[in-house]
Amino acid sequence: MKPYTQQEQAFIQQHQHRSPAELMLQASRYPNLPVADLVKQIQARQKAADKLPTWVTNTDVVFPVAVSVEQSSSEAAAAFKASFFSGKLLIDLTGGFGVDSFYFARQFERVVHIEQNSELSEVAAHNFRLLGADNVEALNSTAEDFLQTFEGKADVLYLDPARRGERAEKVHLLQDCEPDVLRLLPLLLQKANAVLLKTSPMLDIDLAVEQLGTVTKVWVVALQNECKEVLYLIEPSAGIEPELHTVNILSNGTSQKLSFTKSQEDQAKAGFADPQRYLYEPNSAILKSGAYRSVAIQYGLQKLHPNSHLYTSAVLLPDFPGRIFECQGVGRYNKKELLARLPSRKANITVRNFPESVADIRKKTCIKEGGTDYLFFTTDMHQKPIVVYCRKAIPTVA
């Protein structure tokens, strides 16, 4: 791979905030530069600005095609998962752009980055050298071919299977991803003490645990309240049931965490109440994990309805892992009543266990998005549709 010249790097840096389409229209102004290639670099850097600041701020770093950046972990998520482990050898069997390998390299004496795309493997190797990850070895190979010839035993094998089908459509089931982890699983467990698998948050957790068989831990990871990935730790001998851990990584570096097991969730008995002074909405990691009753028990809250997944209390619980609101009142779903309470005609709308969508409600009521009012359209413990009028009780750290 040929590094960019000083002139090419200067072009990228000078135009890093420009519109890629606009730059392409002006390509004739730079006859001595590979403008199309440089614009692709600028476009990738713009997409990765928040996700991968370490890579973006280094002008020598090379970015691959956009899809590789899209599927790569964010730095925050990569650093979080790397903190689980340490040891002598970790092998990243689906290396991609190398963000996960880079952070695992801080925890392991040696990391092997396996990538079947030769150009992407070369890009990752180049960036590892630039970023000082000298203990990462980049190999161009498929996961299957590498495993067949690998004679040692790793502390951890890590996989983030490609989630796109033959026509570039997104897929989520384990058997539809590449490589097929279910088929490879016996070999994976033979070649390592543990396997760490990253999947799409769209995959059903109970189904994945059942298919994988010997899962000991599951982590549901959200970044600034957007669920990003689910991680499964697979070990040769598993216990009765896996521990489930949820984490929502906030912009200030802190995390909201909750842990439980499926049997604890099944046996938990949450109480119910009408909306009291405070209303609580769990973060996306908790909602994805299915800890609907566990979060109520652990924080001493009552639910509005078995299926609404909104919680309430008379006193403020500032450490709740999610958004916290102060109730301003409860009303019916009635346009005239809604508009009378909202002179600004603006509100942030959420629906939970309600027969209409946000778009339907906005169309019927003409309420625009924004403002300081928050409306929760939901069903109460008496099976009645209600609107809970709220204001934020505590500023959310995104």
Image (tube, grey):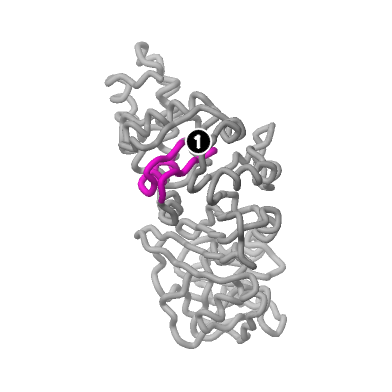
Quarter of the rendering occupied by the N terminus? top left
Q: Is residue 229 above or below residue 322?
A: above
- 353 and 83: which is toward the camera: 83
Locate the C terminus by quadrant: bottom left
Write down the quadrant of residue 109 in the picture: top left
Q: Residue 33: give x, y in percent of width and height.
A: 36, 15
Residue lying farthest to the top in this orientation: 31
Q: Secondary structure at mark 1?
A: loop
Q: Camera-side residue: 83 or 256? A: 83
Q: Is 25 placed above or below 31 here?
A: below
Query: Magenta includes 108?
Result: yes
Question: Residue 97 appears at what percent x and percent y?
Answer: 46, 36
Tell me if mark 1 has few (under 14), some (14-19) or many (20+) residues whose alpha carbon lies within 10 angstroms of its own.
Answer: many
Q: Which residues are magenta?
A: 87-112
Residue that appears at 60% across and 30% down: 145
Occupied quadrant, residue 58: top left
Q: Residue at 40% x, 40% y: name it.
A: 110
Q: Can the viewer see residue 334 in this picture? A: no
- Name the amino acid, label 1: Gly
Place of residue 339 in the rendered image (x, y in percent of width and height, measured from the top left): 57, 72
The answer to whether any part of residue 129 appears in the image is: yes
Circle 1 is placed at which residue position? 96
The residue closer to the viewer here, 55 or 261, is 261
Q: Is 360 positioned to the left or the right of 112 in the image?
A: right
Q: Position of residue 36 (x, y in %)?
A: 45, 20
Q: Residue at x 36, y 37 (%)?
A: 135
